[in-house]
Amino acid sequence: MNDHQIKHYYINLDRSADRRVHVEKQLNAYNLASTRIPGIDGLQLGPDLGGVDPALYRRCHGREIRPGEIGCYLSHLKALQAFLDTGDLFAVILEDDLVILPSYNAILSTLVDGSMTRHWDMVKLQSRRKKRPWHLHALAGESYLGVSALRSTGATAYMVNRKAARRMVERLLPMQVPWDHAFDRSVHLGIKVRAVWPYPVTIDFGQDVSATTIETVRAIKAQGPDRLRTYLWRAESEVCRFGAAVVALVQAKIF
């Protein structure tokens, strides 16, 4: 499959016209097919929203939920559903503050080439944390497909197959944590979560276009029993993540 044929779904709020110009310039420069997903503006949502339980969120994430996080979360699910409504095998989901690096097209081509597709269901193409994932399989150039043994936040760019997209749409409501904490929990979703290293997508924090559209006001943190539940939720998530990474590494060495 030609990487140019892989549809890219980019999330963009109607009020963020500058970001739309930015992301379309990036996509056009690399000749990538794309569809805009009008982002759900959390600031415009009412208080009684299906699929969102503020008390559950507070227990799992340890603080009050913010409207912008709700909008971001629901926007990603909207993009995944748009992909599932097609007959395509793969899709890339993007946020609109990305910077695509020169290695991008070659990496995408390798990821969807022949037997490589059996090694992943979702691949992170960007992360806010720069810890090197464990090496599993070589890709184009110096890049490789790896698995993260530790949490790797950020959801600016990731590729999914239909299995991963379907599991996310079916299992990630009600909202428990922000999207970039929820969508890569491989054990809970029953999918193979992988990452490309070095990441072929980044964020240009030096540009105004990359300023967050999620509120910068610090949310109130949970206290007492809710805080303890948060620590237990995180501990369980990270134990599962580490265990899944060990299994993936062993399988890569054997097969």
Image (cartoon, grey):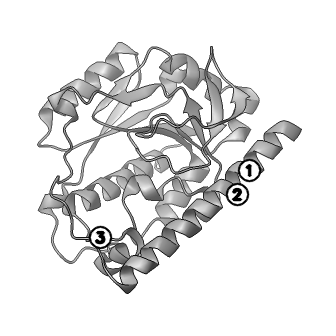
Tell me which residue sits at (32%, 73%) in the image.
Answer: 52
Q: Secondary structure at mark 3?
A: loop
Percent of width and height locating residue 213: 19, 46
Whole-number angstrom distance, CA of label 2 to CA of label 3: 27 Å
Q: Residue beneath label 2, please?
A: 243
Q: Residue beneath label 3, please?
A: 63
Give whichever of discs 1 and 3 has the lower sequence position. 3
Q: Secondary structure at mark 2?
A: helix
**Could you say which quadrant of the image residue 12 lies in?**
top left
Looking at the picture, tell me which residue is in the foreground, 171 or 144: 144
Check if mark 2's residue and mark 1's residue have beta carbons within 8 Å. yes
Callout 2 amino acid: Gly
**Could you say which quadrant of the image residue 21 lies in?**
top left
Percent of width and height locating residue 113: 68, 25
**Could you say which quadrant of the image residue 77 lies in?**
bottom left
Tell me which residue sits at (59%, 22%) in the image.
Answer: 109
